[in-house]
Amino acid sequence: MHILIGIITAIAGLVWALNSLQNSGVNLNAFNPFMWLRRRKWEKSLGTKPMHALTDSMEVAALLVVAVARE
């Protein structure tokens, strides 16, 4: 029985600590590895130039036509 009380106390202490951290302004999503991977992927997509992200050949051709027309 004392082991069960210890486990419940440890879980309650962890919940209390996480709640206190969140109330003090710490973003708990920063500790989530899946959220970190998603945020990293988004930052990498924002860092690339739109010209380098083209996958369709029609879009590339349109880009070349626009580039020639501008000059």
Image: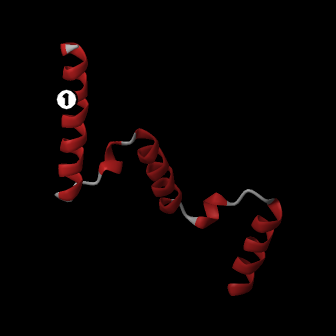
Identify the residue under disc 1.
9
- Camera-nearest residue between 13 and 60: 13
- Residue at horizontal 23 percent and vertical 49 percent from the top: 19
Q: Quadrant of residue 3?
A: top left
Residue 5 rendering spot, x and y as whole percentages: 21, 22
- Residue at horizontal 44 percent and vertical 49 percent from the top: 40
Q: Is 64 displayed left or right of 44 in the figure?
A: right
Q: Is residue 36 above or below residue 14?
A: below
What kind of residue is marked 1?
Thr
- Residue at horizontal 38 percent and vertical 42 percent from the top: 32
- Camera-nearest residue between 63 and 37: 37
- Camera-nearest residue between 6 and 48: 6
- Camera-nearest residue between 33 and 50: 33
**Residue, far bottom:** 70
Secondary element at image label 1: helix
Residue 37 rendering spot, x and y as whole percentages: 46, 44
Quarter holding the C terminus is bottom right
Q: Is residue 59 above or below residue 16?
A: below
Q: Residues within 10 Å of mark 1 (few under 14, many from 20)?
A: few
Residue 22 rendering spot, x and y as whole percentages: 24, 54
Residue 64 rendering spot, x and y as whole percentages: 74, 72
Look at the image and name its color scheme.
secondary structure
Q: Quadrant of residue 31?
A: top left
Quarter holding the N terminus is top left
Q: Is 15 displayed left or right of 68 in the figure?
A: left
